[in-house]
Amino acid sequence: MTVVVKTSAIASPSFTVDDDAARPASPQAARIGTVAEAPRSAARRWVRWARQPGLVLSALFLLLIVAWAVAPTVFAPFDPVTDLDATAPMAAPSSTHWFGTDPLGRDIYSRTVHGTRLSVVAALIAVTISVLVGGFLGLVSGYVGGWLDVVFMRGVDIMVAIPGLLLSLVAVSVLGFGVVNVAVAVGIAGIPAFARLARAEAMRIASRPYLDAARTSGVGGFRILVQHVVPNAWGAIGVLAALELGGAVLSVAALSFLGFGAVPPTPEWGQLVNDGRAYIANAWWMTTLPGAVIALAVLAVNRLSRAAGVVER
């Protein structure tokens, strides 16, 4: 319907108001607009990230690390164990040996590339253990509360009182040598951080009105925990997992440096740094270049995980 308003012959011209144009958009139209806006928002976010050189370089370096772990033979020109260059023991970095060689003439770059898989897989196992165990303890403790919360959190407080590396050393001493045991030890040391965060998220979500409505309508506690608490808490836990991945890489390398990791001559990042420790005065590259790869990997993971945390917030 159209309403025509006229004041007088000399007054201002008439104007019309269209009810259809003034009527608010339907919920379906609003949803269509939101869906159409999502790709534009994602595109703007990618453009904003692309304008940050540090973020781009971190992503490219992590892609290289993943490629090393998946297909090391494609990137490594020599076998890390059997290719011995007797004519160039402890040779400095060159066009043939990019990271130099060790006392046996083995190419350090090839050993670094082949050691990537063990280091990365061990760090992923460690973070997975921390997320699953710590997340379970925290979510159950925060949602159920009561004596269960007291028991779980007092155990977590005891673990927090022990420095992470020392706790890992105690755990790996009990479990024994090996990359898997090192990963489990690092994962145990990371449990308290995830338990505390998951507990805080569970308590925050449990106080929401829609959960009170679900309880009133007869929905069981386990169903609420699985269908509502866990999905809503996963965002914060996932960001913390990305942040802890860099620390896990560093902790795995530290334990391998101390001799708890891979058995020689199997290459692993921490072990490579340890191999060059006795020759650091005469052959700096044996320790410095594998150590630089570890440092850059940790920095790249932290940079990307912090960016992911900003997007999550």
Image (cartoon, helix red, strand yellow):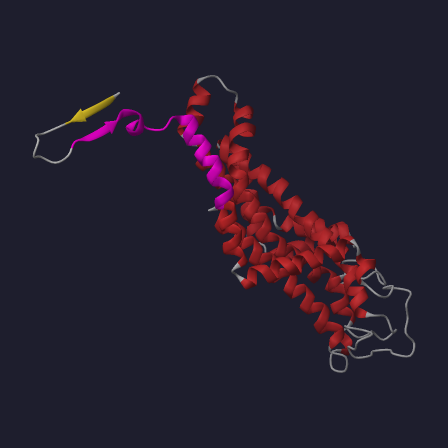
In the depicted view, which residue is nearer to us: 283 or 308?
308
- Residue at point 57% right, 44% down? 238
Residue 81 shows in the view? yes
Please state the horizontal and vertical placement of residue 99, each as a whole percent of the image: 77, 72
What span is in magenta?
14-41
Principal SS element in the magenta part? Answer: helix
Residue 258 shows in the view? no
In the rendered image, which quarter contains the N terminus? top left
- Residue at point 15% right, 34% down? 13
- Residue at point 52% right, 61% down? 52
- Residue at point 55% right, 47% down? 239
Q: Is residue 274 above or below residue 141?
A: below
Q: Could you say which quadrant of the image residue 63 lies in? A: bottom right
Please state the horizontal and vertical placement of residue 212, each as a whole percent of the image: 42, 25
Please state the horizontal and vertical placement of residue 162, each as a whole percent of the image: 58, 54
- Residue 106 appears left or right of 219: right
Count of labels shown? 0
- Residue 134 appears left or right of 35: right
Q: Could you say which quadrant of the image residue 289 lies in? A: bottom right
- Is residue 25 magenta-colored? yes
- Is residue 186 magenta-colored? no
In the depicted view, which residue is nearer to us: 114 or 177?
114
In the depicted view, which residue is nearer to us: 85 or 205?
85
